[in-house]
Amino acid sequence: MSADRTPVSPPRGPGARVVVHPDAATLAAAAAARLVVALQDAQAERGEATLVLTGGSVGIETLKALAGSPALAAVDWSRVNLWWGDERFVEASSGDRNAVQAEVLLSVLDRLGLDRGRVHPMGSSDAFATPEEAAADYARQLAAEAAEGADPALPVPVIDVLLLGMGPDSHIASLFPDHAGARVREGSVTAIHGSPKPPPLRVSLTFGAINTARQVWFLVAGQDKAPAVAVAVTGEAPRERVPAAGASGTRATLWMLDAAAASLI
């Protein structure tokens, strides 16, 4: 059974909260259930919904749980837009790519009317010569989608829910502590060179794009993440040093943790 737990220093951002689950499997199942409701709510409000996906162990387990949800058909998947928060700049068929790992869900959604024209994977190394080119292409796609929305002045479309994992070092997407990507101030997408975690070349949304999302959900499990959670969850640390502290939603920020990751708050 899940339980809400308020840290000593509450997380920043409107409506920010922490929800602790007993283990990673329960966390993934709970996140999947929340996603169904959040996407339904977005469609009721706007006629469509936009979700930004993440990779990582908990992120992919959440997609697996969503794929197996008995409530999956409650969402009109023909009106859901899917984007990614980051990607490894490798070949399109590589199992390292978040988009390839997400097929565990997408292949199921195909049978429920998913419009593949609304699915936007980041560019691969066999489509672009450099991560800079892939980043520029993704920024163009985001801007084009935003131009058709309610606020064309935004560099990205309305994002209803943006999912984030977090590494033991507090990195989110491909924004790493004390690394160039975490210091980017301009634009919606950036190229990453020399990633501390392989592969070295990546493409990532910037804080400028991440923080436009209406809801930002952190999905974090494992004792090795506990020290970083304890620092990041307050939102008080500089984002260049603790990237997870720099992400928040405009309407809500939700930290979904297992008991091990929450053990130091």
Image (cartoon, rainbow, N blue to C red):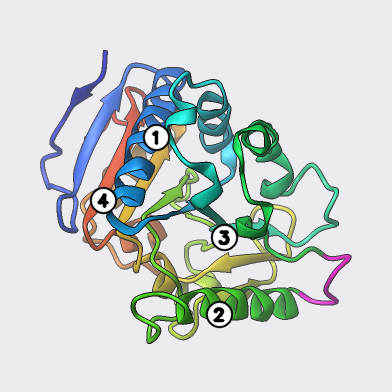
Q: Nearer the viewer, residue 22 or 85?
A: 85
Find the magenta span and give its range.
125-130
**Which residue was labeled with disc 3?**
174
> What's the amino acid at mark 4?
Thr
Q: Earlier in the sequence, mark 4 or mark 2?
A: 2
At 61% across and 44% down in the image, what residue appears? 114
Q: Position of residue 122 (x, y in %)?
A: 68, 63
Give the Cα separation between the discs numbered 3 and 4: 19 Å
Using residue 66 as the reference point, say whether residue 242 is left or right of it.
left
Q: Position of residue 263 (x, y in %)?
A: 28, 27
**Which residue was labeled with disc 2?**
144
Q: Earlier in the sequence, mark 1 or mark 4?
A: 1
Give the Cα separation between the discs numbered 3 and 2: 23 Å
> What's the amino acid at mark 2?
Ala
Using residue 87 as the reference point, say whether residue 95 is left or right of it.
right
At 79% across and 76% down in the image, what residue appears? 130
Label 2 sits on a secondary structure element that is: helix
Q: Position of residue 187 (x, y in %)?
A: 49, 83
**Which residue was labeled with disc 1?**
36
Q: Is residue 180 visible?
A: no
Q: Position of residue 41 (x, y in %)?
A: 29, 45
Q: Nearer the viewer, residue 198 or 165?
A: 165
Query: Mark 3, mark 4: which one is toward the viewer?
Result: 4
